[in-house]
Image: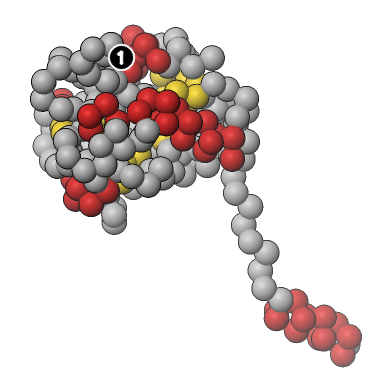
Amino acid sequence: MTRLTLAAAALALAMPAAPALAQQPSPQMSFFITSANPGKGGDLGGLAGADAHCQALAQAAGAGNHRWHAYLSTQGDGAVNARDRIGRGPWRNAKGEVVADSLQELHDGAPKLTKQTALTERGAVVNGRGDTPNMHDILTGSQPDGAAFAAGEDRTCRNWTSGDAGSAMLGHSDRIGLNDSPPMKSWNSSHPSRGCNMEALKATGGAGLLYCFAAN
């Protein structure tokens, strides 16, 4: 090996590795889990703020050509059902894999929605039970059929305006719970949170993440 070749090899070893490029989502992506909470726990700025968070993350990932809605219900006067906000399907993840073909399939077992398919906007798997930290609790405020809860006991962090008092209904993105009962495996209605601030959401087993669906 010549001195010139040796010098080139040494220079290559000394150079820092190029940073890995972020994975571009499939152009068919119409579903994802947010990679982060906006920063105030259950206070998402209402439905409008939650939708804007979905839209911003999708835009940053190169999928801003859809109208994105958060899968969230509200309670009380003018209650909103999460299932009415997300279109009719089918929905695909960042890899282009179908997670549900229709509203009926999505709310009738959702067999295609698993830890391996419920990906972030960048195509990453969300930590589940057994991972550190566990982040499988996803904010939904919804019943298993995607409908809102009746007014009364808070299940929506005061309609997504409270980052402290209240509670939110959560789903398990990995479909795993403390036991094998159907609610513990529910992607959208497993159990309520301990509170609405980030500390409470993390202690329950999440990170204040949302499901986002392309509504058009």
State the image coordinates of residue 13 (x, y, percent, origin top left).
70, 79
Q: Give me the residue at 44% from left, 10% from top.
A: 88
Q: Give me the residue at 60% from left, 31% from top.
A: 63
Q: In which quarter of the image is the N terminus?
A: bottom right
Q: Is residue 50 left or right of residue 195?
A: right
Q: Of residues 189 and 93, which is closer to you in this image?
A: 189
Residue closest to the far bottom? 3
Q: Above or below — where is 3 with respect to 175?
A: below
| Residue 72 in view here | yes
Q: Above or below — where is 213 with respect to 199?
A: above
Label 1: how many residues lie within 10 Å, few (<14), some (14-19) or many (20+)?
many
Q: Above or below — where is 124 with respect to 44?
A: below
Number of marks in the rendered image: 1
For label 1, the residue is 80
Q: Is mark 1 on a helix, strand or loop?
A: loop
| Residue 98 in view here | no
Q: In which quarter of the image is the C terminus?
A: top right
State the image coordinates of residue 30 (x, y, percent, origin top left).
51, 24
Q: Give me the residue at 42% from left, 26% from top.
A: 48
Q: Of residues 122 and 210, which is closer to you in this image?
A: 210
Q: Give me the residue at 34% from left, 14% from top.
A: 83
Q: How is the image coloured?
A: secondary structure
State the image coordinates of residue 85 (x, y, percent, origin top left).
40, 15
Q: Is residue 75 left or right of residue 105?
A: left
Name the amino acid type tagged 1.
Answer: Val
Q: Is residue 178 left or right of residue 186?
A: left
Q: Is residue 98 left or right of residue 105?
A: right
| Quadrant position of residue 201 | top left
